[in-house]
């Protein structure tokens, strides 16, 4: 099964907003509201930022928000800060017989 | 606080096996599943499989079927992942993560680097 499709890189200036897309199929993103987003800084373990499409775990800044339309989920970061520079991965539950969860290929966010 | 602590780095020869542990604390171990995710150098995240800490049911990624075994020891709140017949492309950081019923992973262990080299 192919990974979910994310842009390889996005960039923005401090204070701006950016959006990262995550495109799947009706067997994963489009079929279930079980989309999550993770932030990973170099050399660190991933950190959950959004779950069930749009929910934020306790302690995650409200500058991070998630949404979904059809087979595409999106992560929006508003008021960009230097510490937001990291890799971001989406994931989704999948009904595929070969997998249980599928990840996106990851997006490198650069804060200019 | 909820925490997963993994065993240390390993260096293995091709064809060998590796067993990574993941000790949970701060929550009721049997109330969640544990997924294992790996990340090859410079690459993205790859889901490897899941085990229910409640009843030991497993679900493995098809590409690893036959080479991977996931187990738990509820007496010590520890999950294990064993990968056999190691190849060079199994070189990666291996993470365990607590998985909820809605398929999110939180928290993650700190990662265990497994290097496969002759």
Image (spheres, coloured by chain):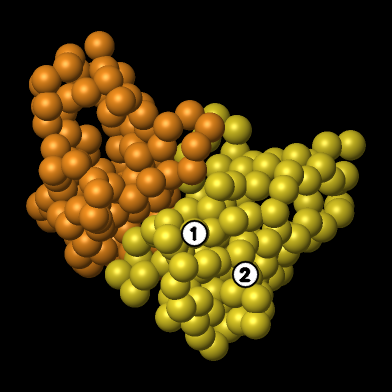
Chain colours: A orange, B yellow
Q: Nearer the viewer, mark 1 or mark 2?
A: 1
Image location of residue B94, percent across then percent down: 61, 50
Q: Which residue is mark 1?
A: B3
Locate the C terminus of chain A and report the quarter of the image it occupies.
Answer: top left
On the rendered structure, is B26 left or right of B100? Answer: right
Question: In this rendering, is residue B89 above or below A27?
Answer: above
Please tell me how crowded label 2 is: few (under 14), some (14-19), or many (20+) other residues with Cα within 10 Å.
Answer: many
On the rendered structure, is B96 left or right of B31? Answer: right
Task: Residue at 72% x, 64% y: name it.
Answer: B82
Please tell me how crowded label 1 is: few (under 14), some (14-19), or many (20+) other residues with Cα within 10 Å.
Answer: some
Locate the N terminus of chain A and report the quarter of the image it occupies.
Answer: bottom left
The chain under label 1 reads: B
Which quadrant of the structure image shows residue B81? bottom right
Judging depth in this view, the residue of B98 and B63 nearest the camera is B98
User: In the rendered structure, which disc, 1 or 2, sits on the residue that comes first in sequence?
Assistant: 1
Q: Kindly identify which numbered label has been placed on residue B79.
A: 2
User: Tag 1, which secondary structure?
Assistant: strand
Image location of residue A71, percent across then percent down: 19, 53
């Amino acid at each position: 099964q192919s990974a979910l499709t994310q842009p390889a890189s996005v960039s923005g200036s401090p204070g701006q907003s950016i959006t990262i897309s995550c495109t799947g199929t009706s067997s994963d993103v489009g079929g279930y509201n079980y989309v999550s987003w993770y932030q990973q800084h170099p050399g660190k373990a991933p950190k959950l930022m959004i779950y069930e499409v749009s929910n934020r775990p306790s302690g995650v800044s409200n500058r991070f928000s998630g949404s979904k339309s059809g087979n595409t989920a999106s992560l929006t970061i508003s008021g960009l800060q230097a510490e937001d520079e990291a890799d971001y991965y989406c994931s989704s539950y999948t009904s595929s017989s070969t997998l249980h969860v599928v990840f996106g290929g990851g997006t490198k966010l650069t804060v200019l | 606080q909820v925490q997963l602590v993994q065993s240390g780095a390993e260096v293995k020869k091709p064809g060998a096996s590796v067993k990574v542990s993941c000790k949970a604390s701060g929550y009721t171990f049997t109330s969640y599943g544990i997924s294992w995710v790996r990340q090859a150098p410079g690459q993205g995240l790859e889901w490897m499989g899941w085990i229910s800490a409640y009843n030991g049911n497993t679900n493995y990624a098809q590409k690893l079927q036959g080479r991977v075994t996931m187990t738990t020891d509820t007496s010590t709140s520890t999950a294990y992942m064993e990968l056999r017949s190691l190849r060079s492309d199994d070189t990666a950081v291996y993470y365990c993560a607590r998985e909820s019923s809605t398929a999110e992973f939180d928290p993650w262990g700190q990662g265990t680097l497994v290097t496969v080299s002759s």
